[in-house]
Amino acid sequence: MEQHENGNGHIAPHGFTTTASRGARMPLFSPPAVNAVAVEERAASLAKRSIKKGAKVAGLKLAISMMDLTTLEGKDTAGKVRQMCRKAVTPMDSDPTLPSCAAVCVYPNFVTIAKAALEGSAVKVASVATAFPSGQSPLPVKLDDVRRAVEFGADEIDMVIDRGAMLSGDYAKVFDEIAATKEACGPAHLKVILETGELGSYDVVRKASDLAIAAGADFIKTSTGKIQPAATPPVTLVMLEAIRDHFYQTGVRIGMKPAGGVRTAKQALHYLVIVKETLGDAWLTPDLFRFGASALLNDVLMQLEKERTGNYQASEDFSKD
Amino acid sequence: MTDPDRTADRPSADLVKRETAVEKARQKTAALALEFGKAWEYAPAPETPDHIKLEERYQLFIGGKWMPPKSGKYFDTVSPSTEQTLAQVAEGNAEDVDRAVKAARHAYDKYWGKMRGAERAKYVFRIARALQEKARELAIVETMDGGKPIKESRDVDIPLASAHFFYNAGWADKLDYAFHGRKVRPLGVAGQVIPWNFPLLMAAWKIAPAIACGNTVVLKPAETTPLTALLLAQIIEEAELPPGVVNIVTGAGETGAALVAHPDVNKVAFTGSTDVGKKIQRALAGSGKRLTLELGGKAANIVFADAPLDQAVEGIVGGIYFNQGHVCCAGSRLLVEESVHDILVRKLKDRMATLRLGDPLDKNTDVGAINSRAQLERIKELVLSGEREGAERFSAPCELPGKGFWFPPTFFTNASQSCRIAREEIFGPVLTIMTFRTPDEAIEKANNTMYGLSAGIWTDKGSKIFHVATRLQAGVIWANTYNKFDPSSPFGGYKESGFGREGGRQGLAAYLEVQ
């Protein structure tokens, strides 16, 4: 029997044969069940950690460095994207100790513009692709979408899985599409959006997480931001547990990105607590944890200013890019 | 086709090579550890005790008045996390107990036994509300006096204590409908002796149903944790209950013995050790007094291979490390299906690395102080016996504070049913892990104990829950959760874990003559 190994070091001894040319193998498919009540309880209990003073400032700065500043609208323009890029590099001029954001996240049409605007900075350009947000297009179209975004200069690709295939039990299709997308990414990092708000249960979220990881995801990501609910603490915890089990089996660290619905500094700290107490120190880095958000940054800045000056500033004091 | 490498007694070279590779990979990944270090440390977040005003010296609460003890003696109550004396507390003797029982009898005859249920309910509701209003103060004092994390006293002990008064207050005017057309009447004076693990909550479990049903009570709190019961006495005073309905007599074992032996007590309720429970039952034989006992436990928490393991780990941790394991229904024996033993232990170790032990007043503390030096010594002795008997010990990698009484969260693997750590109640943060192969074996091992208070079942299969639960000899069985309490749910044991139920409609029966 031929053994294949994909980018995540996943070896599946009894895998299905798949059409994926990169040689990823789909694992025999019975991922662990999730106890919904208990997972929600655990996520809620981690919200009770009291994060004050130095820990709060350090946590919020870490959160900024993990942000994928995002605009994904039909009305996006070059001007809007450039302004956002400026903010990602320098979140607030008055405080030079603040880190830059990790990346900006845009549609493929704006990758070139973002790339130019970010030149000389360490901020990465992430592009959604694969017929985002629904993914309801033929595979060649989706792969073409990916290849073009990478050609335009995207460092990271945020793909969507085929939720219809996932829910109808066609796991091989979901797996193959992810594996093919990974191949189309070339050097770009691949984040796989599960769109957990459409999956219906934690069991399916866990299943999709395991599938995405086995098929070659560098990151798994909760949501497109177009569907409610988007990221929630318990859904993130379930995905982190999939990442943990993969680490136990292979030693490979997969990244996590909750996206959509993370709007406040307090929520961001809650997510960081969940990561810290589920996966530990190694994941407390933008290389392995990201926030997909648009409104979060200004609330974080407001809280940091409050810690620095002792007073809350008006929301008008923060730039709205 | 004949494989040239394969003979009858020699596996093919390829197969050997492959198995070696798989074994190497397994060893490599088994050694991978998550790091729970100092990448992002939480700052201290202590609840401040500055506004707490404790008296230097507490008297006995008898007949609605604060009275000095006839013994003239007082004892110190110390904080187990700092070893500082918090207050002095009166030591009641047999004479004080007699005064208290007389006051209770007087209150029963004169007011409380005759009062309409709806009237009694008003007073009991008043206590429930006052507990809510003073929740923060009570939580801080509970944590200072007993050593438990503020997170637990704030989120569990105090809200539940209040909930028990609310729940029972609601029954006070409906008792005639509680037992299907049968008439009920109160028993008279109840003598109640409670332990140190949930001081205020146990007082609420005992007092709330007793007085809601029309009895009057004399309660003796544990000598290491008397403060919140005394604060409850202040609340009862402020709630203007008729004098003598609730009397609190502090003291040690002798005070309790005098209370249960008092001839004018109609009902004895005791929560504590099995040894003391047996003595009480002997002392009461033939006296006609009603008795309920809630004693020790050595609960089996059974994890089947099909259980959601990550959530089972949470249940295991909550089952044994909640309140430093000072819980009679603690899941102190973990029975795990052999096929998932290694991965479960690995997950448990990583989870334990995140437990924060230390200042119980810090809001981020998960594991507080051991309640007393005596209890710490007992835990140490039993842990030592586990090591001597050849079980393998693992303790969470946490630093213990210099002052106070501390023991790190610990578990033993490679333990067998015959070990002391698998048979005796440790009443500390120490888990004994054993394996099983089939459901029948799990049930047999779970029942192989003199206790029968509680058990846990972890499986994704509903049918297995019912199959196993009906065969377990335990008063409380949790499925896919652990240590869940509610005033409407009866709680109590089988075998040497005692008899009688507290909570729910069944809990009322313990304080009523059902005619």
Image (tube, rainbow, N blue to C red):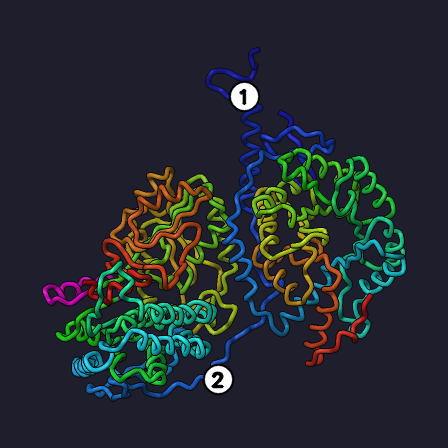
Is B244 located above or below residue A171 in the figure? below
Residue B369 shows in this picture: no
Disc 2: which chain? B
Q: Position of residue A165 (x, y in %)?
A: 67, 37
Taking depth in this image into account, of A179 and B134 the one nearest to the observer is B134
**Mark 1 to mark 2: distance in Å?**
75 Å
* Badge 1 or badge 2: first in the primary sequence: 1
Quarter-wise, where is residue A15 in the image? top right
The residue drawn where x is 39% and y is 52% is B478
Look at the image and tell me whether residue A125 can be seen: yes
The quadrant in which residue B110 appears is: bottom left
Going by the numbered disc 1, the residue's amino acid type is: Ser
Amino acid at dot 2: Asp
Stretch in magenta: B271-290
Question: What residue is pinned by disc 1?
Answer: B12
Secondary element under disc 2, as helix, strand or loop, is: loop
The residue under label 2 is B50
For the residues tagged 1 and 2, is the chain the same? yes
Q: Chain of mark 1?
A: B
Quadrant of image for the N terminus of chain B: top right
